[in-house]
Amino acid sequence: ATKGEMSIDPLRIVAKEMKFLTGNIRQLLGSGHPSLDRVAKYYTQAEGKHVRPLIVLLMSRATAICPKNELAPAHSTEGINASISPLNILADVNPSSPLTGFSSQPESTESDILPSQRRLAEITELIHTASLLHDDVVDHSISRRGSPSANYEFGNKMAVLAGDFLLGRASVALARLRNAEVIELLATVIANLVEGEFMQLKNTARDERNPKYSEDIFTYYLQKTYLKTASLISKSCRAAALLGRADVTTVEAAYTYGKNLGLAFQLVDDMLDYTRSAKDLGKPAGADLELGLATAPLLFAWKTNPELGSLVGRKFEQEGDVQRARELVLNSDGIEQTRALAEDYCQQAITALSTFPDSDAKDGLLEMATKTLKRQK
Ligand code: FPP
Ligand code: MG
Ligand code: MG
């Protein structure tokens, strides 16, 4: 009963919109200062996977045919493409500088995706990229997307400042959507990213020398995972539905989809850190243990092997700890259990969309859930 079940490519469904993504993001990041410009745009050079914008665009299209909230205010989209360069101090000095403000969506297409929703897709990628700039500093990472990381290339100071600049420009673009609820959602995401990172730095709520495994520890890990990864995906799915004036049920479904997909996405990430090589990932592998982090595969292993407690307690800092922990995890069913949990979340993401009318975009979202489990990097 299925036309081309093998060949759903989520990217193809919003290819036209995705084509402008990187160019538009680079325009949002235009700065009058050449070296700021360079650092800020650095992670837009190597093609990222653009998972978040892809999901936002698919969600925008899939919800376009869902019931509407007749009470939702129609928002002015006038400001979205207005040209400004508030920080472009050098433009006055050098008027021939090719720096402009925010531009270049194809103005009127028959697309059911609104300009505001396309801008939202760009904003999610900006926030994500800002978090990567900061994350690579926090993690002392030396590579990202197969190239030297920004901190390695330009130093910590520039990497941190560039991340801040991205957040600033993302905030300007967000304000221009003229939708207070959407602004609040994405501002909360930025706070959540930091909260998640803090939770991760502490690893558990309490610092103990020889902690015993408990379900609280797993709950803490999941809460951290929501804040660090799923918050951005879930709240931007919610924002996409809101911008499309979808009804409450649809908005909630979009959020639930994003939340479960986001949790699955990070669980897979934490699994790949154990199972793939740095070459495959384009970033350091086995990094989590080196950073003292106990993620899902280890927590599952710890459940049946109390020996891991003392290693967790000292953050795998002693000679041979990392190797010992890795061995214990790989010889346990931790990887398998992590995969099973990720599968569970993906299934919940899929179920969340059951009220959506059939469409290519919905199929794309369903396929994203399947692909999340299959991804190798
Ligand atoms: C990647 O995780 C990092 C994140 C998802 C968020 C990191 C958040 C901060 C550093 C807080 C600052 C936030 C902002 C918005 C500036 P990872 O280290 O597990 O993934 P990786 O393997 O790709 O490095
Ligand atoms: Mg990292
Ligand atoms: Mg990190």
Image (cartoon, rainbow, N blue to C red):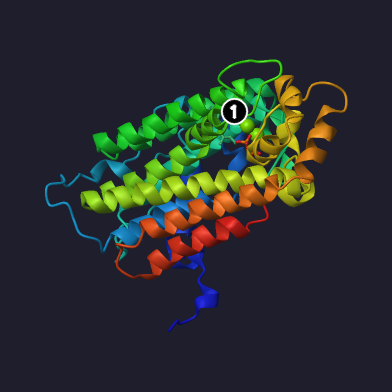
Question: 339 or 87, which lies in front?
Answer: 339
Q: Position of residue 155 (x, y in %)?
A: 70, 24
Q: Nearer the viewer, residue 268 or 47?
A: 268
Relative height, residue 204 to residue 245 (above, below): above
Q: Is residue 266 above or below residue 344?
A: above
Quarter of image, ligand 3: top right
Question: Where residue 34 sits in the image (x, y, percent)?
Answer: 59, 31
Mark 1 crowd level (few <14, some 14–19, many ≥20, 10 Å Cα): many
Q: In percent of the image, x 38 and y 41: which residue is there?
A: 235
For residue 295, say whether it is visible. Answer: yes
Residue 228, image x, y percentages = 52, 34
| Image height of 236 relative to 175, above or below | below
Q: Residue at x 42, y 35 (%)?
A: 170
Task: Look at label 1 and name its amino acid.
Answer: His
Is residue 33 at least partly visible in the picture?
no
Q: Which residue is mark 1?
A: 134
Label 1, ligand 1: CB separation under 8 Å: yes
Residue farthest to the left, as pictured: 71
Q: Nearer the viewer, residue 360 or 367?
A: 367
